[in-house]
């Protein structure tokens, strides 16, 4: 497992205090890819924990191909080589993924069990939920069963999603009112 972690060697890992704010930016840089977290002074973590979390993020990004899609042309060869190295040690990758609560999964067709649905609306909502979950797994490499976020962080994510919903609803309300 440490072979996988050893592949990721950041160019720089640092903490910066934000001016006029009681928060800090943690940054880890690998080529032109930057992993960062903004944390308040009450939620600071040790630099080595941030580095470990950042390595996890980069590893998942490489395995999913997301980093290769987003990196500059100058860095494509470097990240392709990292991905090839990881793919040449499948057992180590699987061991690493299991150690962080994930298992390597092959792309599968999503099947739906609609036995408990009485309406087409229910069936469509279930389809949307399963599709959304699959997209989240492909994007973030994990499910909502992950345990690395605190209750407060989950609440923050939910709150931000609710704010987005409020904005979408207000936009539609404004458009609807303008039609009258």
Image: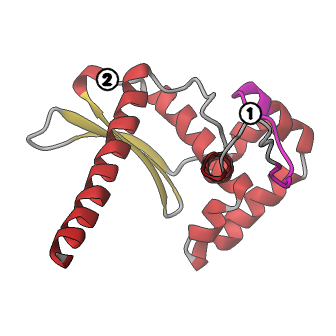
Residue at 33% across, 24% down: 44
Give the main secondary structure, helix, strand or loop, of the magenta stretch.
loop
Q: CA distance from mark 1 to mark 2?
A: 26 Å
Magenta segment boundaries in residue numbering: 96-111
> Residue 108: within the magenta?
yes
Residue 1 visible in rendering: no
Q: How dense is the environment of label 1, judged by Cα within 10 Å: few (below 14), some, or many (20 and up)?
A: some
Disc 2 is placed on an element classified as helix
> In the rendered image of this protein, does residue 45 appear above or below residue 51?
above
Q: Residue furthest left?
A: 20
**Residue 114 in which image quadrant:** top right
User: What is the x, y in percent for residue 25?
Assistant: 31, 41
Residue that numbered label 2 is attached to: 43
User: What is the x, y in percent for residue 177?
Assistant: 17, 69
Residue 104 versus residue 55: which sits nearer the camera?
104
Disc 1 is placed on an element classified as loop
Residue that numbered label 1 is attached to: 102
For this view, does 178 lie left or right of residue 54? left
> Residue 105: within the magenta?
yes
Q: Quadrant of the N terminus?
A: top right
User: What is the x, y in percent for residue 53?
Assistant: 54, 34
Q: Quadrant of the C terminus?
A: bottom left
């Amino acid at each position: 497992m440490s072979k996988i972690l050893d592949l990721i060697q950041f160019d720089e890992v640092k903490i910066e205090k934000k001016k006029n704010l009681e928060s800090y930016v943690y940054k880890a840089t690998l080529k032109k890819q930057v992993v960062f977290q903004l944390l308040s002074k009450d939620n600071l973590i040790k630099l080595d924990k941030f580095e470990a979390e950042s390595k996890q993020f980069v590893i998942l990004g490489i395995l999913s191909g997301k980093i290769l899609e987003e990196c500059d042309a100058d860095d494509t060869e470097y990240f392709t080589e990292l991905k090839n190295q990881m793919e040449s040690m499948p057992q180590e990758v699987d061991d690493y993924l299991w150690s962080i609560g994930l298992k390597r999964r092959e792309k599968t067709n999503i099947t739906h069990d609609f036995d408990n649905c009485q309406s087409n609306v229910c069936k469509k909502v279930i389809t949307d939920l399963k599709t959304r979950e699959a997209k989240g797994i492909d994007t973030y490499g994990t499910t909502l069963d992950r345990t690395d976020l605190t209750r407060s962080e989950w609440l923050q994510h939910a709150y931000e999603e609710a704010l987005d919903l409020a904005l979408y609803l207000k936009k539609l309300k404004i458009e609807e009112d303008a039609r009258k």
